[in-house]
Amino acid sequence: MLCKHPDVQEKVAVEVKEATKSMEVKDVDEFAASLREEALEKMHYLHAAITETIRLYPAVPMDGKICFSDDTLPDGFSVRKDDLIVYQPYAMGRMKFIWGDDAEEFRPERWLDKNGMFRSESPFKFTAFQAGPRVCLGKDFAYRQMKIFSAVLLRCFVFKLSDENRAVTYRTMINLHIDGGLHVRAFHRCRT
């Protein structure tokens, strides 16, 4: 998403630079090793950009659950024991009645409060990591890894699509895959 939204990519890069107080990066490995938890916690816009990407392109685009007993869903629909219920985080991330009229737009700002601080939504609204007793135990670890990886790469490089005219398409399997891969070019950022 950041290749298609260079303004967001640049905002993230500036935030990483400010949060890490890194004026000059001579070595990617050295920068990665110097990244601290305190700096990651200041990267609210990066967290929002990652979350917005996951909202639109969840790793698991559809998920199923088996009913353990007869029950009635919140909308009044009755289910029976052993029924398979499938929900679709991919479709839910684009529903206007959940996310508003701009549901299909990539807009990280939807995750920030008026002070620019990240604010989470109900896990029953943002279902990429599931909710309730089935919430993903690795959610915080996954975010930490995504933030470290993104911070290092975006502080040191600018990314552009190799072919701006090539349509990016997806294959839905157990996980969401980019069909044919995503071809990007990386350019070193200036040393300052």
Image (cartoon, helix red, strand yellow):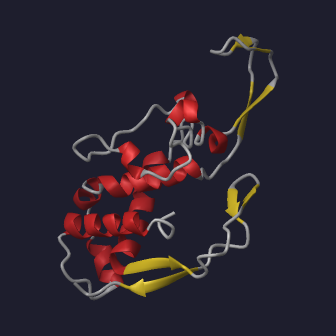
In the foreground, 182 or 33:
182
At horizontal 67% and vertical 16% (from top left) the residue drawn is 73
Residue 26 vs residue 93, the one in the foreground: 93
Q: How many marks?
A: 0
| Residue 96 visible, this orientation | yes
Q: Residue at x 34, y 69 (%)?
A: 10
| Residue 11 picture location, percent across and down | 32, 64
**Quadrant in the picture for residue 119:** top left
Q: Position of residue 42 (x, y in %)?
A: 24, 55
In the visual, does 154 lie left or right of 192? right
Q: Where is residue 107? Give x, y as percent.
A: 44, 51
Vertical side of 67 occupied by 10: above or below = below
In this rendering, the answer to whether 84 lies above or below 170 is above
- Which of the 4 image quadrants contains residue 9? bottom left
Q: Is residue 47 above or below residue 22?
A: above
Residue at image location 29% in from the left, 57% down from the top: 43
Percent position of residue 178, x then y: 68, 65
Q: Quadrant of the C terminus?
A: bottom left
Q: Is 172 positioned to the left or the right of 105 in the image?
A: right
